[in-house]
Amino acid sequence: MSNRSETVPERKVHWRRLQANMGALLLARLIVPLLNVALVVLIARNGGADSLGEYTFLITLFVLLEQLKSFGLPMLIVRDVARDEGLALAKHASLVRLGMWGAAAGGPVLLAIAAGSGMASKELIVAAACIAIGLFPSAFIVANDSLFLALGRASLSTSVAMVENASRLVLSLAAVTWLHQGLIALAVIYAATRFAAAFAQSFVIRRTLRLELAREDHAISRALLQQAPVALAIYVAPIVLFRMDVVLLGILGTSAEAGVYSAAARLISTAMIVPDGLLTATFVTLSRFAGEGDREGLSVLFSRTLRIICFGLVPATIVGVWLAPVAISMLYGNKWQESVVVLRILLWSLAPFALARAMGDALVAMGRQAQVARIVVMTASVSLPAYLLLIRAFGAEGAAWGFVFSAGAVCALSLRACSTETTLARLALFGTTLGPWLLCLGLQQMSDVLRHTVFSAAAMLASAVVLAAAAFLCRSADKVSTLEEPSL
């Protein structure tokens, strides 16, 4: 009992830090994607599907290389610094140096992929060269974001990100609407705002946090590189896996198909704002609980997170399927009806994607990163051929079904992994309900006739009832705790 009582004050501190990080991250996840949606709508309405497809293709390549150049190490550093804040500055310096080397190697790769894509043009290649320069300031931004999050000061990173994206939107609006510029101008603006954000974060670190950044320690850099293979598999491979749709569609398809798909995919990214912010903030606290050996605190937080994420997305998905035509028409106009079908398919991925992310974070916090790496590699190995076949056969709709298949596969494998953990054993209850829900939604989506029948509504209602019953079972399975814990 004494050990348990000693953890109560520390646990309350962790809950307060979690709430602070969560508030800042949710704000960033809310405002920044909405600004990006506004930019996407601007490009779609002024340049059409072709312009939107080319811009989204370049931005997707940039985001992938931004993650690759840091070798997937930022989240591992967040975990380590959350356990020992004395490591913060030393690991920050090493992460910046590794990111700069990665940026130097990533620029030519971005150019090569753009030049070899199905939408290759002189304008696209020049724009790719401009946006590739933005990889260098991103090396600082990625490292700074990890530092802010680990120290419980995510609000500082959020402020810079909001100003960066608001500035990008205003400048892009001026370039497209008033100056009638195209893809190259948008790429220059993107890279320039990345530089501005990097300088702003450095100013905040020195003046607000009053931290003197350390020089690189080569021993720490070598130690980080030794963790890179596992980190790449855990954190970068999933991003590659779930961005593979846009990249392969850009390489194998046309810019118009990529534009139709991107219009719907951007709304899905926006729908994941709250789950993503919650899970990112929760990971820090999960890591602290795991590092202190507080298995009960970890289990309570994990089960609460699953209930909030999984069952919050059920009504969101059902409403989204019904309102998809309205959303597309209001944002993009009546000429984008092809995106409605894509959006209705992609909405399926919300629940399995968020659930898999939550399980993966919990396993990594407990030191099971090798297991997560195997899950991601297995999912990628079966998803790549599925993407290739589906995109060649069905274009944008095929890419959407490939995304849903990937989300379902990684969720199923994660369920299997978590069901073997005693702390996470209650998660097995979710596995018996996720399948029926996906099956009902699958029937609703796969047939145009079925979509407008009474059976469709009945299937959706039945799936919601099944998941509600699962929520009750999971709640009743929770152990009764005598600790007074703050609610999320």
Image: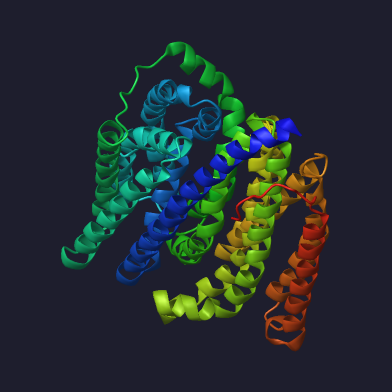
Q: Position of residue 79 (x, y in %)?
A: 56, 32
Where the N terminus falls, by quadrant?
Answer: top right
Where the C terminus falls, by quadrant?
Answer: bottom right
In the image, taking residue 148 as reference, residue 185 lies left or right, namely left
Instruction: Residue at 52%, 74% (x, y): give it.
Output: 338
Q: In the displayed image of the protein, which residue is found farthest to the top?
A: 219
In the image, taking residue 274 as reference, residue 131 lies left or right, namely left
Pick whichever, 460 or 303, lies toward us: 303
In the image, taking residue 200 as reference, residue 439 lies left or right, namely right
Q: In the displayed image of the protein, which residue is found farthest to the left?
A: 179
Query: Quadrant of the rendered structure where residue 89 is?
Result: top left
Query: Quadrant of the rendered structure where residue 351 is?
Result: bottom right
In the image, taking residue 372 as reference, residue 32 lies left or right, namely left
Instruction: Residue at 62%, 70% (x, y): give it.
Output: 317
Residue 381 visible: no
Pick whichever, 343 or 154, lies toward us: 154
Residue 286 visible: yes
Instruction: Residue at 47%, 62% (x, y): give it.
Output: 266
Q: Position of residue 135 (x, y in %)?
A: 35, 37
Q: Position of residue 371 (x, y in %)?
A: 72, 34
Q: Position of residue 398 (x, y in %)?
A: 62, 61
The mark tally for this picture is 0
Q: How is the image coloured?
A: rainbow
